[in-house]
Amino acid sequence: MVNIRLLTSILLVLIALQSHHAWSQTYGLALHGGAGYMTPESLGPEKSKAYKDALQIALEIGYSTLKKGESSETAIINVISFLEDNELFNSGRGSVLNAEGQVEMDASIMLGKDLSAGAVAGVTTTKHPIKAAALVMNESKHVMMAGDGAEKFSKQNKLEMEEPSYFITDEKRESLKKMQERNSQELDKDQYKGGKGPSDVLNSKFGTVGVVALDKDGNLASGTSTGGMSNKMYNRIGDSPVIGAGTYADNATCAVSCTGHGEYFIRLAVAHEVSALMKHREWDVDKAASHVIHVELENLGGKGGLIALDRRGNVSAPFNTPGMFRGWKLSDGREEVKMFKD
Ligand code: ASP
């Protein structure tokens, strides 16, 4: 009798565990480190390894944050702050320079649970622009702040600040010089198509960072941070801080972060377009994301890519450049870091 009772209890526990597993929320993140004209040849083995290692560490930072039960918002901030500190990427320190030789950074963040969002544009002294974007979202009644006002708000709220020179690296200074000597504009020259072109110029053509995350509560969030495009005009603002263009998140559809030639991404409202196709045509995330990059962006003549993640943990990462630094790590065991075409 006792044994039958014991057996029944064990059985019930096993059934409960099984059904919990079946219903447990997948969590995890996907990230990009910019789309561009890199190929294994233009990057070389040493740099390839450096990027791969950095992407791997970034994924671990995000995944361990989510594993602890912290929010997708916290994961975005932790991962992007790390990438902003890493001068390999075009965000924070190591940002590309504008035509005047200065760094002007843009960043944004959005939460899928309530569509709250924050963004900063053209900041020059905020150490982690993604934190300033989150500050605008959480501590102001606005969505976007620019320039001096955004810096003042960051300072008042005790974010870390740096001198403008902190963000400028020799490598980015050198590539601006070479780019200006050739009078070229980033990402839009046919001569660089297919990764053929001077390697120093090619290697400067990527590095924006973006993260999409899904936490244990099933909440999506996305964030993007960039120095924009090399040799851009003073005060030019790209898609990255524009909610709906470079960044979008809605629990009903997906979280998206874009990278590429920002002017095209703004005109197509790329990040929102992916979400809208899922919402109104009931397409899955990969169909929607691929259509926007390979049909809509391509038809307009734009170059770049995006990462998108839906609430069930489906990832899509289409791009129409030779490469895009990207990776993902999900609680169901999917894990990948890639840089070039498959
Ligand atoms: N989208 C960014 C911008 O236009 C640049 C990039 O992603 O490479 O500012």
Image: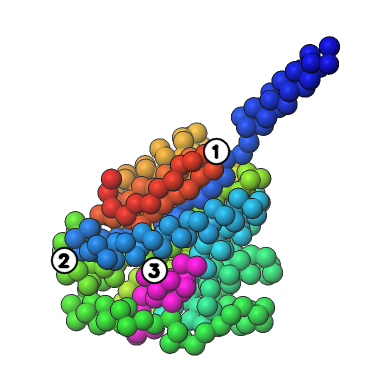
Within 10 Å of disc 3 (Cα), the crowding (few <14, some 14-19, many 20+) is: many
Q: Are marks 3 and 1 in contact (CB under 8 Å)?
A: no
Q: Earlier in the sequence, mark 3 or mark 2?
A: 3
Query: Mark number for residue 89?
Result: 3
Classify mark 1: helix, strand or loop. loop
The residues tagged by marks 3 and 2 sit, at their Cα atoms, a distance apart of 20 Å
Q: Amino acid at mark 3?
A: Phe
Give above or below for 268 relative to 95. Answer: above
- Residue 179 horizontal/vertical position (percent): 23, 77
- Residue 295 horizontal/vertical position (percent): 32, 44
Q: Amino acid at mark 1?
A: Arg
Part of the protein shown in magenta: 82-102
Q: Earlier in the sequence, mark 3 or mark 1?
A: 3
- Residue 157 horizontal/vertical position (percent): 67, 78
Which residue reaches farthest top? 1
Q: Amino acid at mark 2?
A: Gly
The residues tagged by marks 1 and 2 sit, at their Cα atoms, a distance apart of 41 Å
Give above or below for 237 relative to 320. Answer: below
**Which quadrant is home to the N terminus?**
top right
Would the CB of label 1 be found within 8 Å of ligand 1?
Answer: no
Within 10 Å of disc 1 (Cα), the crowding (few <14, some 14-19, many 20+) is: few
The residue pinned by badge 2 equals: 197
- Badge nearest the viewer, 3 or 2: 3
- Residue 134 horizontal/vertical position (percent): 61, 66
Count of marks overlaid on the render? 3
Specify whether 108 is left or right of 116: left
The residues tagged by marks 3 and 1 sit, at their Cα atoms, a distance apart of 29 Å
Residue depicted at 60% across the width and 52% down the height: 66
The residue pinned by badge 1 equals: 312
